[in-house]
Image (spheres, rainbow, N blue to C red):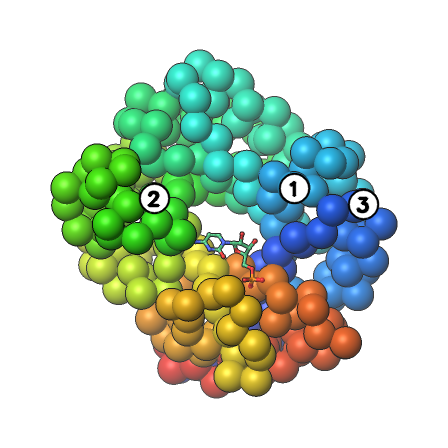
Amino acid sequence: MSLSREQAKEKIIVALDVPTRERALALAEKLYDNVGAFKIGMQLYNAEGPGIVRDIEKLGGQVFIDLKLHDIPNTVAEAARVLTGLQAFIMTLHAAGGKKMLAAAAQAVAESVPENGRKPLVVAVTVLTSLSQQEFTEEIGIDRPIAEQVVSWAKLAKAAGLDGVVASPQEIALIRQACGQDFKIITPGIRPIWAAANDQSRIMTPRQAVEAGADYLVIGRPITAQPDPAEAAQRIVAEIMEAAV
Ligand code: C5P
């Protein structure tokens, strides 16, 4: 089976890794018709505040607010309520905060969905892909293969009532096997063959990632750094439509 244009488009989340509202909106205006959602990370959110989320939503875009919350359960739950009020499409927190923190956030989100609003997907970040095995063992102090820890945190997130995880393309199969078909897997590290790898090393093409079982692909520079971002997004949609799923 292959995906329709609409299904392929819905899988693309563009990372708006820019410092200002003007640059973010200029990109969003060019792209909202060709992608499923926009990711606002800590740079843009901290520079512009929640207004930038509303501005993108006004354009018709869905927003993945990627703040990677990690604090005591009550603090994270209250922050999750705020993001639910903003009608985020997806929000993130660190699995390392533990089951109580994850469950408190999931519950706060479920309780605070506005009338006629939607429930954001609450997803956990597991082991940061920037960490090497050596750093993970010697500096963080967890003497276990990273892949094992990723799967164990994905299971914890699922048990706490979360909707999914952010994971590198290489981890998709293991997580899918451990957490089932309905658990959302969002993956960065995506590079079409025609794009530069930049600083990403463990990469997959959009088609490979979808075939491996990713629900959503976070894509930044292969779209945002192109002379014609809308055309780049359309090429990626076409590539995803060819995936055998
Ligand atoms: O430009 P590029 O496609 O590399 O952007 C990928 C986005 O995904 C960035 O916002 C980056 O912070 C994020 N990300 C990542 N790798 C992770 C987690 C998040 O590249 N493991």
Write the residue at 39% across / 43% down: 125
Q: Nearest the camera: 166 or 182?
A: 166
Q: What residue type is labelled 2?
A: Thr
Circles 3 and 1 in contact, beta carbons < 8 Å: no
Q: Which mark is residue 21?
A: 3
Could you say which disc has been placed on residue 43 in the image? 1
* Whether label 1 touches label 2, CB < 8 Å: no
Query: Judging from the image, what secondary structure is the residue with disc 1 in?
Result: helix
Identify which amino acid the numbered label 1 is placed on.
Gln
How far across and down, in percent of the image, does residue 32 sit? 73, 61
Quadrant where the image shows the C terminus: bottom left
Is the CB atom of the residue marked by disc 3 within 8 angstroms of ligand 1's nearest atom?
Answer: no
In the image, taking residue 116 as reference, residue 243 lies left or right, namely left
Q: Does the residue labelled 1 lie within 8 Å of ligand 1?
A: no
Front residue of 199 and 240: 199
User: Mark 2 highlights which residue?
Assistant: 126
Amino acid type, mark 3: Arg
In x, y percent, where is residue 85? 64, 28
Q: How crowded is mark 2: few (under 14 residues within 10 Å), some or many (20 or more)?
A: many
Q: Distance from label 3 to label 2 (Cα)?
A: 29 Å
